[in-house]
Image (cartoon, helix red, strand yellow):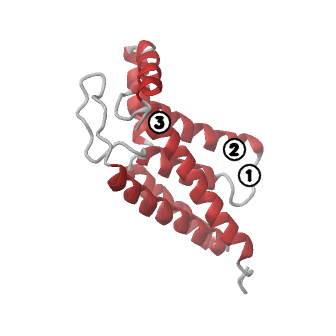
Amino acid sequence: MMTGGFDSAVRDTVHGWSSPWLTGVMLAVTYLGSDFVLIPVALVFAAILFATGSRREGVLLMCALVLAELVYEGLNIAFHRPRPTPFFGLATPGGHSFPSGHAVKSTVLYVAMTLFPMRPVLIRAVGVALAGVIGFSRIYLGVHYPTDVLAGFALGAICLAACSAVYRRMPVWPSE
């Protein structure tokens, strides 16, 4: 990838903002984008959607997450980009760097959660901001290059858009 100058400049700038309290916050925030949090949250939210009669939305959410995981894994293997050296003495996570799985899956889940059923603008902004801060935490902690995170956001948005396009064409189910 020919992104070295951009990635280095952004990583250096973000690392220059580091402080012990911000590092603690970023470690907590990045956890919100881990599979340990995302999977249970997605399952609970989908169950709530199903239980409240929003089955189509539950199916859309789960399809978007499965699509995101499949495309993310495929790109991760195809690009095979090594991870950067993490900051703060953190261990290098397993897997490859491009795209950021935290950014992809957080974008799909936390943004989708703000859409079903229709939510106020403030709640939508919180979902988008949460996905954004999770992506930023990956750069701050040094476990991803900025282009990994930007690609993750884009991939998450594409997965949501693709599934939303299918959703709009789905017939209304009898019990809804």
Query: Is residue 33 visible to the viewer in this orientation of the structure?
Result: no
- Labelled pair 1, 2 in contact (Cβ < 8 Å): yes
**Along the horizontal axis of the image, is 87 left or right of 69?**
left
Residue under label 3: 147
Secondary element under disc 2, as helix, strand or loop, is helix
Query: Is residue 40 visible to the viewer in this orientation of the structure?
Result: yes
Q: How dense is the environment of label 3, judged by Cα within 10 Å: few (below 14), some, or many (20 and up)?
A: many
Residue lying farthest front?
A: 2
Q: Nearer the viewer, residue 46 or 94?
A: 94
Q: CA distance from mark 1 to mark 2?
A: 6 Å
Q: Is residue 141 above or below residue 77?
A: above
Residue under label 1: 119
Name the residue: 55% across, 52% down: 156
Q: CA distance from mark 3 to mark 1?
A: 30 Å
List x then y, in percent, for residue 62. Answer: 52, 67
List x then y, in percent, for residue 97. Answer: 35, 42
Q: Amino acid at mark 2?
A: Ile
Name the residue: 64% across, 39% down: 126
Q: How dense is the environment of label 1, judged by Cα within 10 Å: few (below 14), some, or many (20 and up)?
A: few
Q: Is residue 148 above or below residue 23?
A: below
Residue under label 2: 123
Secondary element under disc 1, as helix, strand or loop, is loop
Name the residue: 30% across, 37% down: 83
